[in-house]
Image: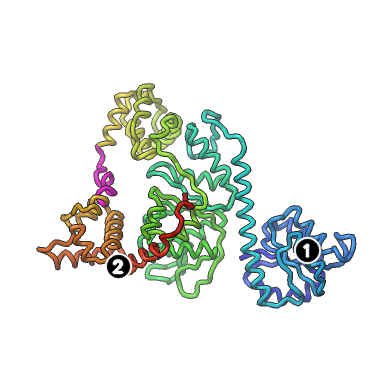
C-alpha cells in the first residue's frame, strides 16, 4: 500500500475518479500548495505526489508558475519524490518546463483511469529506484571518510564484540548499511555470530517493529514453511484452533532474519521471492485477504550461495534480491585478538546463568585460548568457558583447566559433522557408500542426504543410476534397495523432474557473467 498526495484547487471534481484508481492505497487530498506541503511535513512517508500545475496564487508570484512554485518547494526537501503534474489546459510550454525541472509525468484532466493507474505504477517504481540510488550514494560518501583503527574505544551498545581491525571495519559497514533499505547478506561459518550481527543491524536501523529470527533449516516442508512465514487462519487445517500470524506479520515495521537460507526448498524460495517483490502476505486458509507488510529481510548462510546458484539449488532472482550488499564475518581463528574481549562478555553471561562468583583467566590460559583453532567459533568458545567455570575450584581459570576443557570439547561427538561435506565430495568422486540410505541419514543427517541425492541425480539424470553410483542400490538386493531409495526421496520431498528442471534453468543461463556477484 502506497501513500499518495493529490494537490489540486479543484480536488473535489477529480476526487471520485482518483479514489477509484487509487483503491487499496492511502490517499491524502489538499486544496492548495500550502496545505499539501503541511500534509507532507506531517506524514513524511509520501510515495507519489499528483500536483495541479495551475492553481490560484499562493506560493507563486504569477498565475503561470503557481504549480511550478509548489513543485520547487517540494523538491527542496523531497528530491526523491516523483511528482505527476495535472492540468485541464493544453499548456505545453509550461508542461515541458515542469518536466525538464524534474517532474515525472503529465496527465490531462479529467484523468483517464487506465492511464493514471499505469502512471502510478511507474511512479512507484521510480520512487524505489531513487531511494536505492540515494542509499548507494550515501554509502559511497560515508565510505570515503577516514576509518577508525583497531584499538579505539568500543561501543557497549554493540552485541557483536571484538577489538580487531576486522571487527572495527565490520561495525563501520553495519553503521552505514543499517539505516538504509538495501538488502544485506551475512556470510560466515557456523557459530560465528551472524544472528548477533543481524540484531545490531536492526538496533541501529531505527525500525520500530520486532526483530524476528527464523532458521530455514527448520522449514523443510512447504506447508510448514508457509505457516511459519505467512501464518494461518482458524480452521485452515486440522488443529488450527485459532488464527496465528506468520513471521512476516510479526516483523512488520521491523526486521526478519532468515538464517541458513541456502537450506530453503525451491518451492519455498518462490514463495519468499513473491513476498519480497509484492510486499504482501496471505495467511493459510479460505477467504484470507492479502496484507501489506513493511519488513526488512536480512539473510545469512555458512554456505557459498554462488555455487548453489550455479548448481540450480538456489534461485538466481532471489539471490540478487537478498544479496545487494555482503558482510563477510571472518572466523575467530583469524582474529585471536578478539578473544579477550569475547571472554569478558561470555563470562558475564555465564555468571548470571550459573549463579557463580566472578572468575578471571590467567595469562597462560588466555594464550592457550588464542592459539586454539576454534572450528566452532564463538559458540565453541562459549562451551569451553562454561565447562571451565563449572569445574573451577578457584577464581582463576589457569592453563591446565583450560587445556582440560579444550580436550573435553575435542572428544565431544563431532565425527559426522566433521565429515558431512567431505563424504559427499568423496562419493561424487567415485567412492561408494554401501551401508544403505538410512545409515547415511543417521550418520550424516538429512541435509547431507538431500544434498548428495540432488547433486548425483542432476549428474546422472536418473534415480536408479544415482542410487547405483552412490552405492545405495546393489545388484544382489536391487528391488529392495531401489524401493527404499524411492521411499526416502518421498520423505525428503525430492522429485526427479524438479531437480532436472532446476539444472536446465541454470544451463540455459550459463553464459551469464558471474563476476558481477563478486
Decide whether residue 55 is among the magenta residues.
no
Decide whether residue 416 is among the magenta residues.
yes
Relative horizontal placement of residue 29, taking residue 454 as reference (left or right): right
Quick one: 351 or 345, which is closer to the camera? Answer: 345
Query: Does the rendering let one see residue 266?
Result: no
Question: Up-down: is 215 above or below 106?
Answer: above
Residue at 37% over, 66% down: 504
Q: Position of residue 463 (x, y in %)?
A: 24, 66
Quick one: 71 or 380, which is closer to the camera? Answer: 71
Q: Residue furthest right?
A: 62
Q: Residue furthest top?
A: 363
Query: Does the rendering let one see residue 160?
Result: yes
Please name the residue that numbered disc 2 is placed on.
496
- Which SS class for mark 1? helix
Q: Which one is in front in this view, the residue at disc 1 or the one at disc 2?
A: 1
Quarter holding residue 428: bottom left
Quick one: 517 or 67, which is closer to the camera? Answer: 517
Residue at 18% over, 61% down: 468
- Which SS class for mark 2? helix
Q: Position of residue 171 (x, y in %)?
A: 53, 39
Spatial distance from mark 1 to mark 2, Cα to Cα?
58 Å
Q: Tell me the magenta residue range.
A: 411-424
Please name the residue that numbered disc 1 is placed on.
98
Q: Position of residue 352 (x, y in %)?
A: 43, 35
Question: Up-down: is 100 above or below 391?
Answer: below
Tag count: 2
Q: Position of residue 397 (x, y in %)?
A: 35, 25
Residue at 45% over, 67% down: 232
Looking at the magenta stretch, what is its main secondary structure?
A: helix
Amino acid at each position: 500500500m502506497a501513500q499518495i498526495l493529490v494537490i489540486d484547487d479543484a480536488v473535489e471534481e477529480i476526487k471520485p475518479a482518483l479514489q477509484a484508481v487509487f483503491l487499496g492505497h492511502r490517499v491524502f487530498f489538499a486544496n492548495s500548495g500550502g496545505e499539501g506541503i503541511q500534509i507532507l511535513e506531517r506524514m513524511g512517508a509520501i510515495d507519489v505526489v499528483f500536483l495541479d500545475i495551475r492553481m490560484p496564487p499562493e506560493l507563486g508570484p504569477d498565475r503561470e508558475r503557481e504549480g511550478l512554485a509548489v513543485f520547487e518547494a517540494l523538491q527542496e526537501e523531497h528530491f526523491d519524490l516523483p511528482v505527476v503534474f495535472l492540468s485541464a489546459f493544453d499548456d505545453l510550454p509550461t508542461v515541458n518546463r515542469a518536466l525538464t525541472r524534474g517532474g515525472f509525468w503529465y496527465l490531462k484532466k479529467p484523468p483517464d483511469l487506465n492511464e493514471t493507474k499505469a502512471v502510478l505504477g511507474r511512479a512507484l517504481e521510480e520512487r524505489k529506484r531513487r531511494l536505492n540510488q540515494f542509499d548507494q550514494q550515501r554509502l559511497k560518501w560515508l565510505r570515503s571518510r577516514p576509518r577508525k583503527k583497531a584499538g579505539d574505544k568500543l561501543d557497549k551498545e554493540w552485541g557483536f564484540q571484538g577489538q580487531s581491525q576486522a571487527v572495527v571495519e565490520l561495525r563501520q559497514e553495519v553503521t552505514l548499511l543499517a539505516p538504509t533499505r538495501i538488502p544485506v547478506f551475512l556470510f560466515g561459518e557456523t557459530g560465528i555470530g551472524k544472528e548477533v550481527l543481524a540484531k545490531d543491524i536492526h538496533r541501529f536501523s531505527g525500525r520500530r517493529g520486532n526483530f524476528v529470527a527464523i532458521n530455514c533449516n527448520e522449514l523443510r516442508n512447504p506447508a510448514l514453511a508457509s505457516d511459519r512465514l505467512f501464518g494461518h487462519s482458524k480452521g485452515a487445517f486440522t488443529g488450527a484452533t485459532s488464527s496465528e500470524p506468520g513471521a512476516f506479520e510479526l516483523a512488520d515495521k521491523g526486521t526478519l532474519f532468515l538464517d541458513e537460507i541456502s537450506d530453503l526448498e525451491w518451492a519455498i524460495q518462490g514463495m519468499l521471492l513473491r513476498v519480497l517483490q509484492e510486499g504482501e502476505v496471505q495467511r493459510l486458509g479460505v477467504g484470507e485477504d492479502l496484507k501489506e507488510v513493511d519488513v526488512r529481510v536480512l539473510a545469512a548462510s555458512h554456505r557459498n550461495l554462488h555455487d548453489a546458484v550455479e548448481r540450480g539449488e538456489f534461485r538466481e532472482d532471489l539471490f540478487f534480491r537478498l544479496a545487494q550488499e555482503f558482510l563477510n564475518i571472518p572466523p575467530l581463528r583469524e582474529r585471536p585478538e578478539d578473544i579477550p574481549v569475547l571472554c569478558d562478555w561470555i563470562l558475564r553471561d555465564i555468571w548470571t546463568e550459573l549463579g557463580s562468583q566472578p572468575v578471571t583467566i590467567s595469562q597462560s590460559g588466555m594464550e592457550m585460548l588464542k592459539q586454539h583453532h576454534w572450528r566452532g567459533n564463538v559458540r565453541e568458545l562459549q562451551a569451553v568457558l562454561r565447562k571451565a567455570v563449572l569445574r573451577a575450584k578457584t577464581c582463576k581459570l589457569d592453563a591446565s583447566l583450560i587445556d582440560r576443557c579444550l580436550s573435553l570439547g575435542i572428544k565431544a561427538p563431532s565425527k559426522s559433522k566433521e565429515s558431512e561435506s567431505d563424504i559427499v565430495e568423496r562419493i561424487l568422486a567415485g567412492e561408494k557408500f554401501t551401508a544403505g540410505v538410512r545409515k547415511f541419514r543417521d550418520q550424516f543427517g538429512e541435509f547431507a542426504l538431500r544434498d548428495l541425492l540432488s547433486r548425483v541425480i542432476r549428474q546422472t539424470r536418473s534415480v536408479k543410476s544415482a542410487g547405483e553410483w552412490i552405492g545405495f542400490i546393489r545388484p544382489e538386493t536391487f528391488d529392495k534397495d531401489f524401493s527404499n531409495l524411492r521411499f526416502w526421496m518421498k520423505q525428503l520431498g525430492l522429485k526427479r523432474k524438479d531437480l532436472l528442471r532446476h539444472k536446465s534453468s541454470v544451463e540455459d543461463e550459463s553464459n551469464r557473467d558471474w563476476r558481477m556477484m563478486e
